[in-house]
Image (cartoon, rainbow, N blue to C red):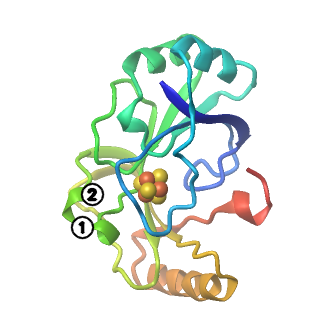
Amino acid sequence: MRVNEIFYSLQGEGFLTGTPAVFVRLSGCNLRCPFCDTDYAAGREMTETEIVSAVMEHPAHLVVVTGGEPSLQLTESLVDSLHREGRMVAVETNGTGLLPHGIDWITLSPKDMFLGESAKPILCEVDELKVVYDGVHKPNPYEHIKVRHARFLQPCDTGNLEKNKEIINQTVEYIKTNPQWRLSLQTHKMIDIK
Ligand code: SF4
């Protein structure tokens, strides 16, 4: 499995915000989002045993497998191995690929609003939906997808402070008029942690 990085931090976004977690960032993505802030291309080959050992160096119960796009590589055997060690396995996916069985928490962050049909999510049931809002593309609530916990709108980080402030205000106003949404902020960036 090609791994970009494994690190220990707090989950910064969505429903599990503030929860300590070991992040396993797998290399590679099938999409090219214009606002992507993840350096997912680089990586080194690791066996599943090596990944589990690296995760076990940290005490957190939660393991977040992210990317890039984790569905390109994640296997049921890695999920099972992490379970055997008593860990909870969460995945953050763009939803374009099938995921292995047994994942405890699925965060769907679809990108088809920006990229079109080829990025349409194929998942039917997830734990949370996290849609990036840029103030331009109307957020799709994906009502056909069963979302067990919450639908989040997350202001797009453009890298420009002025623009970001404008998008945050637009997001807040959008949520106030469309209250099926909740606000997700990238709190790790606000407190300057990884
Ligand atoms: S799906 Fe995620 S990792 Fe892939 S290009 Fe888009 S923002 Fe980046």
Q: Secondary structure at mark 1?
A: loop
Is residue 52 found left or right of 18 in the rendered image?
Answer: left
Residue at mark 1? 116
Q: Is residue 185 left or right of residue 98?
A: right
Mark 2 vs ligand 1: CB under 8 Å?
yes
Q: Are marks 1 and 2 in contact (CB under 8 Å)?
A: yes
Q: Residues within 10 Å of mark 1 (few under 14, many from 20)?
A: few
Q: Is residue 160 above or below residue 14?
A: below
170 and 50: which is toward the camera: 50
- Give the residue type at disc 1: Gly
Viewer can see residue 134 = yes
**Residue found 38% across the figure and 19% down from its top:** 76
Residue 107: image tag: none
Residue shown at 64%/62% (left/top)? 186
Determine whether 187 is above or below 8 in the image.
below
Count of all numbered marks drawn on residues in the image: 2
Q: Position of residue 132 (x, y in %)?
A: 46, 68
